[in-house]
Image (cartoon, coloured by chain):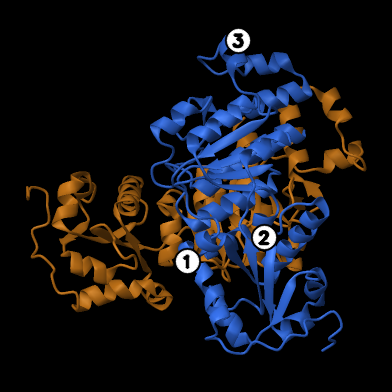
Chain colours: A orange, B blue
Amino acid sequence: MNLEGRPQAPLMSNPRADRVRDVAKLAGRSSRLKTGRFLAEGPQAVREALSAHRAAAVDGGPAVVHEVYATEACLDRLPELADLASGVMLRLATDEVLAAMADTVSPQGIVAVCHTSTATLEDVLAAGAKLVAVLCEVRDPGNAGTVLRAADSAGADAVVLTASSVDIYNPKAVRSTAGSLFHLPVVTGADFTDVIHALQAAGVTVLAADGYGNVNLDRLQDLSAVRRFGGTAAAASSRPDGEDAAAEAALPQLEQPTAWLFGNEAQGLSDAELAAADHRVAVPLYGRAESLNVGTAATVCLYASARAQNG
Amino acid sequence: MNLEGRPQAPLMSNPRADRVRDVAKLAGRSSRLKTGRFLAEGPQAVREALSAHRAAAVDGGPAVVHEVYATEACLDRLPELADLASGVMLRLATDEVLAAMADTVSPQGIVAVCHTSTATLEDVLAAGAKLVAVLCEVRDPGNAGTVLRAADSAGADAVVLTASSVDIYNPKAVRSTAGSLFHLPVVTGADFTDVIHALQAAGVTVLAADGYGNVNLDRLQDLSAVRRFGGTAAAASSRPDGEDAAAEAALPQLEQPTAWLFGNEAQGLSDAELAAADHRVAVPLYGRAESLNVGTAATVCLYASARAQNG
């Protein structure tokens, strides 16, 4: 092993050391809340964390990574991770120590203790956010992570989790984001009413993703395509029954700054959450499925906005 | 409890009975392969299974449900399930027996032993399929189930799993489908080369969902919108660099009968699988995510086809 630029401190080899236990405790919410830290496991997540840490250092933003633990074998295999970690405390540890720290069976030789996000919706909106995903009482960590990753793919400017949603720093949720957790601002513990007020004050249209919504997402996409490509006459002729010109004019435009509300897996959005939105939008079901899972619904909605906004 | 139309056989109360063990064994693939049966757990899945069973009986199709086990409390709470089960062997059992049979911690008082699908791609194509999802080496049961549910939502005519994909009758996969497993033909254990030949012989365009694909899904959707709404001049002006009129004309049309290939979670589609497709289509990534999970990619692709085909 080439030790240049590598950590010089002694190898950590005791899986029962206090420091190891402290890291392992981050699998629990209470320890995460107390310390303001969480664990990113495996090379992909650690790489994204370190990249975000570097970018934040350049921009004068808050630190992302607190410390990194890695095996010698991992750093030999992936030397770019040691390079990326310059300026971050990097400690060598044995496989046993890594296994004792991590939630995954095999963290593949590297974990990073990271700081939970301090992003605020106010900052996100002040920076001119055009697409925001709001998770209201989403309870499954895998679903929350999947929605966050889909939001990143669709180029969303932020993801907001209301206070009653699952903790996005739960190890399973972190894994499901596949690194996207470090790609965009994540606002946690938000009060739903405050979120709605802030979005509306900033001129962001709030759309509730709702299987029973009276607005059809396909219609919004059609109208967006018509505005982009012309063909107004054809669009008018495609107007569905029950929609007159005034009703069409009142529909939200996907090109405009938009926040999507996604609800609980079993119950969807509550009546109060639906009432707070500007529109209730349904993703069409073409087959015989009775509903969409929240990850699928979020994907369709966020990609519809992304297409319209980037057209 | 009203016993009219209810099972009269004695209550099954021994969780160690052979019959109970036989049902529990369906959690393992070898038992499913040997018996050609699998277990649907919980009221939603059983309801969809029984509805499909009824529809098959009317159409002269093969039986879907072999037998149902339920608690008295469940049938009292959901009497429509007993009605739906008329003509199917329905046995009363205790909570302990249900728990011993089921993979889930709580099967909510009802499970159905079902027959695995005998659908063939030939039948699906002979019936004029316009949208087919093909899973190639998808390995995670939750992902496979999510793609199947998304395919149902998008109105796909069938889902095909190649021989090296996960078993869709795995309990976790069945749960992830949320009943969609019973909504559309599912072809399992298919040989990849045979599938491609059958699709192409039937005039179905084969599109590989591929993050490195040279065809942009957004461009296909734009061209589809232009064909629908007119505005050809605007479309020509939106032509991306490097695409001349001949290249545009060679692009696949989403309105046409289409099969989508979705690959392994980690590796994507293999070179051989990519080469077999007519086109390699990339879902655009607007943010900083490096890739999409297979459920998200399948959702975007299948919904793009559904919108074009149902416009």
Report in which chain the residue with disc 2 lies.
B
Report in which chain the residue with disc 1 lies.
B
Q: Earlier in the sequence, mark 1 or mark 3?
A: 1
The x, y position of residue B118, in whole percent, is 63, 50
Residue A168 vs residue B180, the one in the foreground: B180
The x, y position of residue B42, in whole percent, is 65, 72
Q: Which residue is mark 3?
A: B245
Circle nearer the viewer, 3 or 2: 2
Q: Is residue B297 above or below residue B254?
A: below
Report in which chain the residue with disc 3 lies.
B
Q: Label 2: few (<14), some or many (≥20) within 10 Å?
A: many
Q: What amino acid is at disc 1?
A: Gly
Q: Earlier in the sequence, mark 3 or mark 2?
A: 2
Residue A128 vs residue B83, the one in the foreground: B83
| Mark 3, secondary structure of its residue | helix
Q: Which residue is mark 2?
A: B179
Which residue corresponds to the image point at 75% horizontal and 28% vertical from the top-left?
A226
Q: Earlier in the sequence, mark 1 or mark 2?
A: 1
Disc 1 and disc 2 on one polypeptide chain: yes
Query: How far apart in space, not on screen, are marks 1 and 2 (Cα)?
Result: 20 Å
The x, y position of residue B171, in whole percent, is 54, 65
Q: Which residue is mark 1?
A: B28
